Amino acid sequence: MRKFEKITHYQNESFDLPKRATTHSAGYDLASIEEVTINPKEIKMIPTGLKVAMNDDEVLLVFPRSSLGIKKGLTMANNVGVIDQDYYNSPINEGHIMIPIYNFGEVSQTVLKHERIAQGIFINYLKTDEDFTTEKRISGFGSTDK
């Protein structure tokens, strides 16, 4: 099953789940659930209030929306986010999708509540024939190298 859900903390918030803008759009628009101001040369984690369930052989790749850089001088700090299937319901943060945004401009910028900042694209992936990994995820950003 592939679907976006609200995390528990934001269950009572009124906001739409991600959707594609047009019939042929590849990406699902991801928006900020809070207003966040980002100073020049600063990175802020932008909460979406979302988690995502997907099939075992899928990953959600997260890219910045093109308008983010052009209109505001903002981009994703990690360029492309990778949300693995086993991040869903992570015991540390319920699998909350957070978008790290970097302000490469010279003035502070505010990401508004419900402003679309990124897009997620579901992709199938392959594994090598020698892949016998049995490790389990316990958290998010950088957790698999701890």
Image: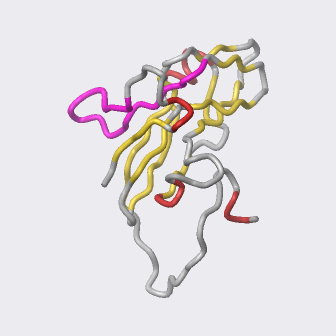
Near-viewer residue (8 or 132): 8
User: Magenta segment range?
Assistant: 17-34
Image location (x, y in percent) of residue 12: 47, 24
25 part of magenta stretch: yes
Residue 34 image offset from top left, x and y in percent: 59, 20
- Location of residue 16 (image quadrant): top left
Vertical side of 136 occupied by 120: above or below: above
Q: Residue at x 74, y 31 (%)?
A: 43
Q: Main secondary structure of the magenta part?
A: loop
Give the residue drawn at x 60%, y 42%.
Answer: 79
Most distant residue in the left direction:
23
Of the 4 image quadrants, the one containing the C terminus is bottom right
Q: Position of residue 25 (x, y in %)?
A: 29, 35
Q: Which x, y percent locates residue 38?
A: 72, 20
Q: Residue at x 38, y 32 (%)?
A: 18
Say how many tags the image has. Answer: 0
Looking at the rendered image, the quarter that the N terminus falls into is bottom left
Q: Is residue 98 left or right of residue 66?
A: right
On the rendered structure, is 93 left or right of 12?
right
Q: Quadrant of residue 91?
A: bottom right
Colour pattern of the rendering: secondary structure
> Which of 42/113 is in front?
113
Q: Nearer the viewer, residue 70 or 92?
A: 92
- Residue 103: say if magenta: no
| Residue at position x 52%, y 29% in the image | 10
Residue 88 shown left or right of residue 98 in the figure: left
Above/below status of 20 relative to 146: above
